[in-house]
Image: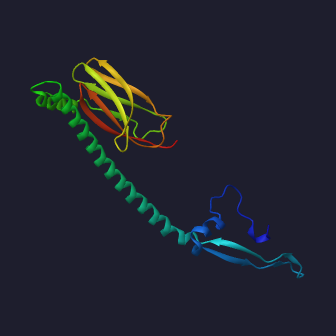
Amino acid sequence: MHANLFPPSGPQIGLLAQDLEEVLPQLVDDVTDPAAYDEQGNELSPAMTFKSVNYIGLIPVLIGAMQEQQATIAEQNARLDAMEQDLAACCEGRAMMQGLGGGNTDGQNTNELRTSEAADQRLTITPNPFSEGTVIGYTLPKAGMVSLQVSDASGKSLFNLFEGQQMEGTQRYDWNTSFLAPGMYHVTLLVDGAPLVKKAVKVAR
């Protein structure tokens, strides 16, 4: 190594100039370090040309990238919230149609009551986002037939986590998500056909 290019001792953090040059060539320059001589004029080390990174110029680029990333995240969150509302409305409409089709003359009023009750079930997913697993918690105001369903971001049903009769009170389901690909999902809690939907986000480990 050139005599003038020895780095300080200890771990160092930086960028490979060759990698950065492929993306932002304007931040990489070729610099020539002159040859070094002793007092008698003997060459100690030859001249060497190397690449130098303009770290100061990199700062506004990084800030701009972070701002763009935050704007993208905000846009995606808004889209996810809209999709969650659409999915909840879809499930509610389907439950009402099932009630009307079952011969119940006051099916609409019954399903509206069930939907109101579902709002009190306090469906929670903790932690959320998650990587390997999470806990689904909910409170049943009364005993009933319970179904926990998972759908993808588009609302397509994927699988059931649980289906069966449960007593009133606080319930929990330990959800192992290690087999799921990272992405956004919806968890739907159905109690006697009344839906409650929550967004669930799986992140890479």
The image shows residue 157 at horizontal and vertical percentages of 36, 36
Please determine whether, in this image, residue 88 is positioned above or below residue 35. Answer: above
Furthest-bottom residue in this view: 41
For the residue pair 94 and 189, the one nearer the viewer reads as 94
Q: Quadrant of residue 50?
A: bottom right
Question: Could you tell me which residue is drawn at 88 percent across and 82 percent down?
Answer: 41
Give the quadrant of the N terminus. bottom right
> Seen from this angle, which residue lies furthest left?
105
Residue 88 picture location, percent across and down: 26, 39
Q: In the rendered image of this protein, does residue 75 appear above or below residue 40?
A: above
Residue 117, percent from left and from top: 19, 29
Q: Quadrant of residue 42?
A: bottom right
Q: State how the image is colored.
A: rainbow
Residue at 22% from the left image edge and 20% from the top image edge: 142
Task: Looking at the picture, tell me which residue is in the foreground, 26 or 143.
Answer: 143
Q: Is residue 188 left or right of residue 117?
A: right
Residue at the image position 46 percent from the left and 63 percent from the top = 65
* Residue drawn where x is 90% and y is 81% of the image: 40
Q: Nearer the viewer, residue 69 or 37?
A: 69
